[in-house]
Amino acid sequence: GNKISKWISEPDRGEYDATNKALRLATGEIVKWMTDDDLLRHGVFHKAVDYLDHHPEMDVVFGQTAFWRETEGEPVFIGTTSATDPSRLSMHYWLRESQGVTSQASFIRRRVFDRSGPFSTAYVCGDTEFWIRAASKGVSMGLMPDIVLDYYYTAVGGSATRSRRVVIDVIRINIRYGTMADVLDVVYRRLITTSVAYRIGKLRKALKKVMHPSWRNKE
């Protein structure tokens, strides 16, 4: 439809508690989960429904996402996802955070929640845990080539403002569902690589302060 049939504004225990409340109210066969600062593109519901109608074996379909960042009050285009290999939507790739799609670009059959349960409220990145749990229960996931969503990076996003907690929670999720190799992979990517890049950045800034002006011009 083209109208809001139910609106609730009340205290909750975070983003995923609020999402679970909405899931309990939803009556449709296909669920579309969205955050408030992103935009769906025109016609994407028809495309998702058409895909799922023609692929009854699929439980979830992901479209592509366009990314934007606000600079001086204006949206600046960053790029898009280009996922083409549905095999990368397996549990292994979700654990390694290399699935190539965003949660907001998903269209989910209700039977997924019946099989996998609701979003966990124990993690800042509850959607990551949900997809890994769903994949572990055999939920099938497919891909559409269409861009369905415009995703806007903002300073107030939950993950952006709680990045340290996200890292801790991703490690916890990998310990729960993955192997030791998965845990070591996320520790390397999220902690060691990030720390090295941060230190290199600080070193570059420190060197620029002491470099002769003629050297700076060579960069």
Image (tube, rainbow, N blue to C red):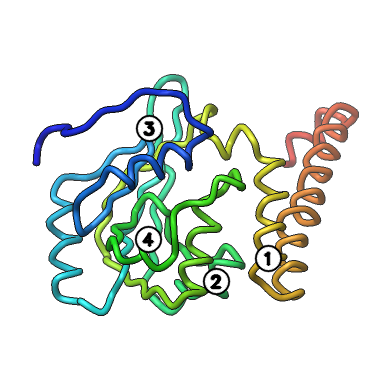
The answer to whether the residues at label 3 and label 2 have Cβ atoms under 8 Å apart is no
Above or below for 91 versus 31: below
Camera-nearest residue between 133 and 82: 133
Q: Is residue 139 left or right of residue 59?
A: right
- Where disc 1 sits, the SS reads helix
Of labels 2 and 1, earlier in sequence is: 2
The residue labelled by disc 2 is 93
The residue labelled by disc 4 is 113
- Where disc 2 sits, the SS reads helix
Q: Residue 127's spot in the image, x, y percent?
A: 49, 52
Above or below for 214 versus 105: above
Of labels 3 and 1, earlier in sequence is: 3
Q: Residue at x 44, y 28 (%)?
A: 70
Q: Tag 4: Cα neighbours inside 10 Å, few (<14), some, or many (≥20)?
A: some
Q: Residue at x 34, y 53 (%)?
A: 105
Q: Residue 50's spot in the image, x, y percent?
A: 13, 66
The residue labelled by disc 3 is 37
The residue labelled by disc 1 is 176
Q: Quadrant of the N terminus?
A: top left
Instruction: Give the amino acid at mark 2.
Output: Tyr
Q: Residue 158's spot in the image, x, y percent?
A: 54, 35
Q: Is residue 85 left or right of residue 57?
A: right
- Marks 4, 2: nearer the viewer: 4
- Marks 4, 3: nearer the viewer: 4
Of labels 4 and 3, earlier in sequence is: 3
Of labels 4 and 2, earlier in sequence is: 2
The answer to whether the residues at label 4 and label 2 have Cβ atoms under 8 Å apart is no
Camera-nearest residue between 177 and 217: 177
Q: Residue 92's spot in the image, x, y percent?
A: 57, 75
The answer to whether the residues at label 3 and label 1 have Cβ atoms under 8 Å apart is no
Camera-nearest residue between 31 and 49: 31
Q: CA distance from mark 4 to mark 1?
A: 20 Å
